[in-house]
Each structure stands twice: as structure tokens, then as C-alpha cells.
Amino acid sequence: MLYALILVIAYLLGSIPSGLIVGKLFYGKDIRQHGSGNLGATNTFRTLGMKAGIAVTLTDILKGTFATFLPFIFGMDMVIHPLLPGILAVIGHMFPIFAGFRGGKAVATSAGILLGFQPLLFLLVIAVFLISLKISKYVSLSSIIAGIFAFLYSLIFEFGEWPLIAVVSALAFFVIYRHRANIQRIKNKTEPKVKWI
């Protein structure tokens, strides 16, 4: 029963639509009706500005981080691997019950899982993302590159840590799949570039 409760809490935690909450509470806007219509941090940056974007990014990261701590909080760390509730939080972020199952693209919450479980990999992924963003100006492309980097790093430097490799592989797949429309727009040269980095 407690096992199931932790997984449900992780999903509900991931389902908290921070972009929607920040937009409606502080700006009187539903960001689903602006920009890309996505609830994630990137659309928040574009629609509401830097402060809102940073707030949503940090909140979405911490959703993933806190989810990995749930087994420890409930004294179930010997039974539930911390990456499992992390994955449930990511699923909740992508398909939030509190926002009609239309959520973000899993980038920040996926990074939050790494922060909670493998902080060094988190820092490296953030560095790769920022370097790619500086060069390309594409958030979507940088997210995909960061996901691929995390996958390759885990295969090479975390070989044998199969739970981590499996979860990072799943997260990389989620990120790439959720950005398939962006990939097409990059090919067509219609994907918007950021101007703040």
C-alpha cells in the first residue's frame, strides 16, 4: 500500500502545472493560449519573461528531485529505487492530471531526477545544455543534445548501474519524442531562437 502511495504522490507531484500556476496567479495569463501552447519552462520564458521562466524551471527541476527523495522520506529506500518515483514525476509532468493531461516536454523534471540521484551528471548535463544553447540558440536542440549526452555518459561512465542507464535512456527517449515537432521546425528553419543568451 505504501509502495503504491509513493508512486501516486510522485505522479501528482509531477502533475503540478507550475507554468500554468505562475501564469494565472501572477500574470493573469494561461500560457497554454500563448506561444507554443506548452506548459513548460521554454514557453513560460517566451510568454511571461525571464523571472517567470526561471521560477518555472526551478520548480519543475525540484519536482523531479523531490520525487527521488520520497522513498527515503517514507522509509522505503530499501524497497523502492529512488529513480522509480522520479520517472512517475516525469510522466506526471508530461501528462498532468491537473491540466487536462497536456504538460511540458520533460526536460527540467528529468534534470531534477539527476540532481537528486546523480548530481555530477546533473551538472554536466546543464553545462552541455548551456553550451549548446549558446552556440545554436535552439532550446529544443540543446535539450535533445543534453539528453543524448546523459545517455552516452551513463553508458560509458556508469556501466553496470543498470537502473540509472535504463532511466536515463527512457528520459532521453521522452525528451527526443516530445520534441519531434521542434526537430521538424529546425529542419524547416522555422524554429524560434532564443535571444537571451
Image (cartoon, rainbow, N blue to C red):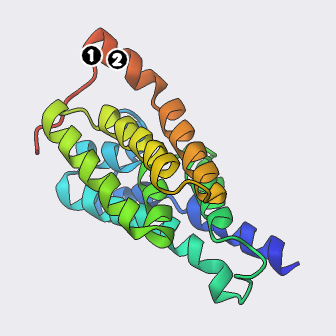
Badge count:
2
Q: Is residue 157 visible?
A: yes
User: How far across and down, in percent of the image, does residue 53 sit?
Assistant: 27, 55
Of the numbered discs 1 and 2, the one sitting upstream in the chain is 2
Q: Secondary structure at mark 2?
A: helix
Residue that appears at 51% across and 34% down: 178
Identified by mark 1, the residue type is Thr
Residue that appears at 39% across and 43% down: 149
In the depicted structure, whether residue 4 falls above or below residue 136: below
Local crowd size for mark 1, using a 10 Å CA cut-off: few (<14), some (14–19), many (≥20): few
Identified by mark 2, the residue type is Arg
Residue that appears at 35% across and 50% down: 41
Q: Between residues 189 and 164, which one lies in front from this camera angle?
A: 164
Residue position for label 2: 185
Looking at the image, residue 196 sits to the left or right of residue 43; the answer is left
Q: Is residue 96 visible?
A: no
Residue reaching furthest to the right: 1
Local crowd size for mark 2, using a 10 Å CA cut-off: few (<14), some (14–19), many (≥20): few
Q: Which mark is residue 190?
A: 1
Quadrant containing the C terminus in the rendered view:
top left
Q: CA distance from mark 1 to mark 2?
A: 5 Å
User: How far across and down, in percent of the image, does residue 180 sit?
Assistant: 48, 24
Cβ atoms at labels 1 and 2 below 8 Å apart: yes
Q: Between residues 119 and 137, which one lies in front from this camera angle?
A: 119
User: How far across and down, in percent of the image, does residue 72 sit?
Assistant: 64, 85
In the depicted structure, whether residue 44 falls above or below residue 70: above
Q: Which mark is residue 28?
A: none
Looking at the image, residue 55 sits to the left or right of residue 119; the answer is left
Residue that appears at 66% across and 66% down: 85
